[in-house]
Amino acid sequence: MTKNNKIEITADGSHSIFSEKFQALYHSKHGAIQESQHVFIDSGLKYLEKQQVNILEMGFGTGLNALLTYIYAAESGLKIYYETIEAYPIKMEKVRALNYLDQLNRKDLTKIFHDMHNSEWNEAHTFDDFTLRKVQAKIQEASFSGQFDLVYYDAFAPLTQEELWTPEIFKKIASYLNPNAVLVSYCCKGSFKRALNASGFTIEKIPGPPGKREMIRATFRT
């Protein structure tokens, strides 16, 4: 991130960040919290119906997906291991300005949210029953610590970063997955579906978040 990346308000009142580097918002303009909640929590974490879940996230970004996962896990008594990759971390001055905790009425989680961002890279940090490990790298060069049940694929769209939506990327991810692991993404592009098919996933098109008709939920075939 550069100092010119700016915070913008999305349609549900929650913040996103516009990336000058990629000329794109980190979230849907129709609502950052609504999108993350629908795509990753409702269509992914809740769908699994497991009490212990290992999650791999592509794109830590503003930390919104991790925050929502922590909240749902705490409310539901889940134990989460959350490993996330981010090549371009945002600065803490931007993190402190984000309004997610106000929008969610969870100001009590301010320290935890900031500690998630401040935690050292490549080391595991535990917040109650939520363990976070952040990897600062490009996914093409990264290695991960274990096998995962759920993937949050939240990279910038194929038109912005085409290289992150190839069969090679998803075959690499598949090598870190447990049997019947699930991958969820806001994207529904044909090339994405073909890349998943070529990497051993069965694809399901399901209703998308506000402003998007469909999204993808895919199950890894073993």
Image (spheres, grey):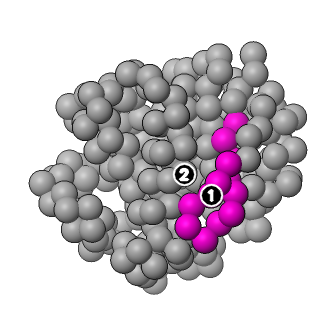
Q: Amino acid at mark 1?
A: Gly
Asked if the magenta segment contains residue 217, the reply would be yes
Tell me, yes or no, if residue 218 can be seen here: yes
Q: Helix, strand, or loop for circle 2? A: helix
Q: Earlier in the sequence, mark 1 or mark 2?
A: 2
Locate residue 193, reporting x and y percent: 81, 46
Q: Residue at x 50, y 53 (%)?
A: 38
* Quadrant (top left/top right/bottom left/bottom right) for the C terminus: top right
**Where are the magenta residues, as a range?**
206-218
Locate residue 204, reporting x and y percent: 74, 40
Left or right of 56, for residue 194:
right
Q: Amino acid at mark 2?
A: Val
Left or right of 204, for residue 87:
left
Q: Residue at x 84, y 36 (%)?
A: 197
Tell me, yes or no, if residue 85 can be seen here: no
Locate residue 24, reporting x and y percent: 60, 75
- 50 w.r.t. 105: above or below: above
Nearer to us of marks 1 and 2 is 1
Q: Which residue is mark 1?
A: 208
Find residue 12 and report its image quarter. bottom left
Q: Helix, strand, or loop for circle 1? A: loop
